[in-house]
Image (cartoon, rainbow, N blue to C red):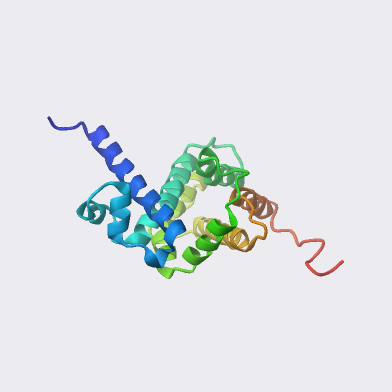
Amino acid sequence: MTEPPGLRERKKAETRRALSDAALHLAFERGLDNVTRDDIAERAGVSLRTFNNYFAGKYDALAYRQLERMRLSINAFRDRPAGEPLWTAITETVLEPLVAEGAEGKAPTAAQLAEVRKLSTAVELRTALYKELSTEWVEAIAERTGTDPARDMYPRLVAGVIRAVGEAATDAYLTADPPVPVVGLLRRAFADVAAGLPEPTARSGKE
């Protein structure tokens, strides 16, 4: 019997998540350099052929969950109330998937953070994260603001700021000692952007 399309797609999504989770757990346990596609497939309980059907390599598998969060954010952004301030809508929708996963108030262990630092230096991983979704953010922002995604700079500027906030918060997250939750860093960064990035009244190292 042929499976209904909805059930088939749900199973595919579950397999992608399982492979992505396996890749991350193995990276934490062994270090990314010591993880192979075969290892990931075995941990997820599928064949190497199945892995290859879903991902081109371990970097794509690692990037998948973050890409999924970003897609959920974009979809949620499109559904926010029309009269809500733009940066409020962006902030809440970017944080929504992380909060749903219990990341608010949850800091990594020192060992986990050390491995995440290594992962963050992988050019292949950053490329996998951002190559697909920039256009989707531009289009969603243009829809909300009544601008043209091809001719107007505004939606591209906003999409660029979203990416910059994510990178700045990630950098702060990676260098925090002791480790801190990433949700609070993102919330603070978006609040600064929404306020127009006012100049700090006190700078590091100065009274």
**Image position, residue 63 (x, y; %):** 40, 56
Residue 83: image quadrant is top right
For image coordinates 22% across by 34% down, the residue present is 5
- Seen at 54% across and 35% down, the residue is 81
In the foreground, 1 or 83: 1
In the rendered structure, the answer to whether residue 144 lies left or right of residue 4 reads right
Q: Report the front residue among 50 and 203.
A: 50
Quadrant of residue 9 in the image? top left
Residue under the image location 28 percent in, 53 percent down: 41
Q: Is residue 148 visible?
A: no
Give the image location of residue 135, x and y in percent.
41, 56
Residue 103 shown left or right of residue 78 in the figure: right
Judging depth in this view, the residue of 118 and 203 nearest the camera is: 118
Image label count: 0
Seen in the image, is 116 located left or right of residue 25? right
Q: Residue at x 36, y 62 (%)?
A: 35
* Image quadrant containing the N terminus: top left
Looking at the rendered image, the quarter that the C terminus falls into is bottom right
Residue 187 in the figure: left or right of residue 154: right
| Identity of the residue furthest to the left in this view | 1
Residue 142 horizontal/vertical position (percent) = 47, 50
Query: Is residue 117 visible in this depiction of the protein?
Result: yes
